[in-house]
Structure formats: structure tokens, C-alpha cells
Amino acid sequence: MLDSVGWLLVFIFLFTIIGVGLQFLQTLVNFQAYLSLVLSFLLLMFLDYARPDKTFLSSIFQSYLLLVSYLLVEYVLILLPIIFYQCWIGNIFVGFGLVLVGIAVASLSPLHRRSEFTHVKQTLTWLPIHNFELRFFAEKLGFMTFVFIILGFLTFIHIGVFVVWIVLFCLAMPEVFKWHESREMVHYQANFVWKKVQSYMLMVGKLVLLPSLIVMVLFPYMWYFSIYLIFCLFTTIFLTISFKYAMFTTVFDSSAASNVVLLLLLLMFLPGGVLITLIYAIIQYTKAEKNMKLLYA
Amino acid sequence: MLEIKNLSFSFGQKVIYDQLSLTFPISSITGLIGKNGVGKTTLFRILTKVYRNQSGEVTFNGQPVTPNMISFLPTDPYFYPYMKGSEYLDIVAKDPSEMIQSRVFASQLDLPLDDLIDNYSTGMKKKIAFAAIFAQSRPIVILDEPYNGVDLESNEAIKYIIHQYGKDRVVILSSHILSTITDISDRIYHLQDAKTVSSHPKEGFEAFAKAMKTQLMDKFSDSE
């Protein structure tokens, strides 16, 4: 139960920030109000698919109606900042539509479960095995990874789609690098952490290259904004990998999840905030190299 | 030869080792036994640099030991989430020869490599960690209770693999089941306390096992 409540609070916090951020973007990049319906639907589906407490909830709320009602309350609460904002600026129908989005996602929720409950999995061989953190994360999300990739190709519709895409990418990173691998999975060499960061930057760079180029060609007046976002993404990679290995231990299973990292990532999207995040990442990076050297060299 | 010279280590006031000295020759399998809490796992953690020795030195062929020289199977291996058995073996292997070797061990241990490790039983997790770690071509292999939770058939397979592929390396293993150690070891170190370690060569195993049994029986009958 605590797990469920904890998740709810974290996501309310996150989505409130995103809700406020989206409205900020609406002003900045002339974001169309109706697009918030599509994006809210995608965000809620992503959250619903990724949440780990679905089995627990379905054991508590055994009736379909009760489960959907509970989820509906959660999802409408999450969308509340956006609903209020839309109503405030006179888009009553969009506000009403957002409630319908909450109903739709809550109703679909009991119909699908995550693939981790199966014994086998679909492998994404196009993601290299040495980038196993991202590969296993993408495999675990399954269908949502596919939706995410499609969203990447839809960035030509509007620069706002690109913004949401990159923000989602950044916010997923702490989860990607959450778990520590076991001692034998590390092939230590000098500057281990930097080599890992480089490897991920190269791979993520390849993934975002096409959508970034599309955005820069179709929306040339926003090129500086696109570059800032890509810089944020690379800073996120640098921060999350550095933080993971700064905390790394070979003794027991542990995770590198941290509220500090999450807050710094959110801070990054405010103008100039990326510099604070970058400084923190550099500190963590020096700690990480030192820690790995101590454990392996 | 792996050599531990005058090793001292303590957790606060509790002294674990006081001037401990041990040697482990190459091409030999050494069993390490001792009651719970005597410091077997602590010794392994010092060798793998998880803990720092407070004094003394650990060398291999005269050079200081680095963690990269050691393959280490912990008592309770843990695994990255959402990973298949085959993927784990691929990641752990440094080169194709290690990868092939680990697959051979996995097949000898009858492991379903296409399944998620998250869904493996305790024994299967131990076996796949053993297959991956033992296939690493490192000169020192440390196995902390490799038989824990493993079925009888696989127990024999593990013994066979250690015996066949442990040559040219220093193999150290710990277990609480004496027979699993005496079956394959060339020598046994019995850790008794911070200072006392008795060494038993292969030819003395039978007498040692008998003495241990008598000692324990006496202890139980006294307590009754």
C-alpha cells in the first residue's frame, strides 16, 4: 500500500511540474491546446504501463469498476494542473476532454499487464548488449518503447512534440540507471565511467539525430531551443551514469535512485538550470571514477 | 602462489584476524571451513577489495593482488533485473572463448538460458553465477559456498567442473558441508578464531573428518 501511495505522490509531483512546464511551453512555442489531449493520453499510458503496483492494486480492488474508479481518481488528480489551466484560459472543452482522457486510460488499465510476469521476453537486438541498462529498460517497457519511438518520428508535427519527447527521455534516465550490476558484469579499465558515458552519448546521439534534424529543418526559428534540450539530454546521461557509479558497491544488490537527481533534472529545464546540474554531475563523476578505481584497480 | 602475510582486520573492537598468514599454491584447490561468523566471507571480501586490510599484505606471484585477478562467486549472487540467462553470460564474458566456456558450463548445469533470471530458483541463480564466474580466465577463483541451494545432480556437476577446469589456477572454496570440500580439495584450512588456523593436507582428510565428528559429538553429549 505504501508503495502505491509513494508512487502516487511522486507522480503527482512530477506531473504537476510537467503540467506547469507544458503551459510554459505553450506560451513559448505556441503549443496548440488540443495537443495536450494527445500528450496527456500518452503520458498517462506510459505511467500506467510502467507503474509497479498494478498487481497489488488488482488484488485489493477485485471488481473492475472499483479498480477503474480508484485509477480514475489518481489520473484526474495528476492531470488537475493542466485541466485547471485549460479552464482558466477558457478552453473548457479541452479541460473536459482531459477528464475523458483520465477515464479512457483508467478503463484500459486492467486490460494490459507488464511483460515482466512472463518467463521469456522479446529482445531488442538493435540495442547493443554493452548498453544493457537502456536495452533491458526498453525491453521491460515493451509496447511503450514502440510508442516512444513513434513519438520520436512524430516530432515533425510540432516542436512541442520534440520537447515532450526529450523531457520524457531525460526523466526516464534515472530509472534506466537505477540498478547496480553485479561485480562480474563490470569490465573495469582506466576511465571506466567516462568510457561508459561516451558509449551512451554515442548511442543516444544516434537515436535522437534524425528527430533533431527534422525539428531544426522544419522549425529553424527554434534551433537554439532544440540544442538546449539535446544538451540537457546529454547532461542527464552524464549525471545519471556518474551518480550510479559514485554509489556503486560490489557487496549487495542496491539501487542508485535519488530524489536529488530527479530534482536536478527538473531544475535543468528552467533557463540556465542545466549549469547547476552539470556542476553536480562533474562532482559525481570524479567521485565515480575514484570509487571504481578503489573497487577494481 | 597466492600469499596472505600477517593479515590483521577488525570490525571496531571485534578482532577478526590477528596476524593471519596463509598460502594458496597454483593448480590447487583449497577448502576453507569454520563456524559461522569466524571470518570466511570477510577474508574473501578483503581479497576482492570490498574491505581494506588494516595491516599485512596479499600477493600473487610476488605482486600485490588486484580485484581484476579474481573471479568471485558470492554466497548470495544478485542479478541485474529483466535479464535472460544467455544475456548475463554474454555480458560477463570478456571475450568469445570465455563466452563459449560459460555456455558449456551452463549446459552441463542444465540451465534454461532463454528464461529471465528473475524467474530462476535460488539454486539456478547460484548455478548460472557459477557458470559465468568460473568461465572467466582469471588466475584466482573464490567460491563462497558454491553448493548452497543446488540440487544433488548439479552438485556433482559443479564438483566435476571445479576439478577439471580449476587447473593452472588458485581455487579457494568455502562450504559448511565437509564432504563437498574433502571430495575435491587438495588442502583444507580450518579457521578457528582470529589467530588459529589449522592446515590439513589431502592425506589427512579422513582423520580430520573423524576428529571433527568426535569433537562435535562430545560437545553435544556434554550439553545434554
Image (spheres, coloured by chain):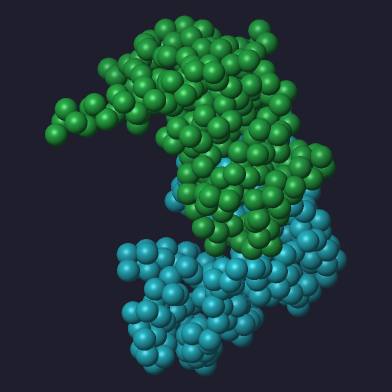
Chain colours: A cyan, B green
B27 vs A260: above or below: above
In front of the other: A286 or B67: B67
Q: In which quarter of the image is the N terminus of chain B?
A: top right
| Residue A30 in sight | no
The image quarter containing residue B101 is top right
Image x and y of residue A102, in percent: 48, 85
B70 vs A13: above or below: above
Image x and y of residue B54, in percent: 44, 13
In front of the other: A120 or A285: A120
Q: In which quarter of the image is the C terminus of chain B?
A: top left
Q: Residue at x 71, y 33 (%)?
A: B165
Image x and y of residue B13, in percent: 27, 17
Q: Residue at x 51, y 12 (%)?
A: B22
Residue furthest left in the image? B224
B223 vs A221: above or below: above
Q: Residue at x 56, y 45 (%)?
A: B155
Image x and y of residue B68, in percent: 66, 27
Instruction: Say whether residue A196 is left or right of residue B147.
Output: right
In front of the other: B147 or B70: B147
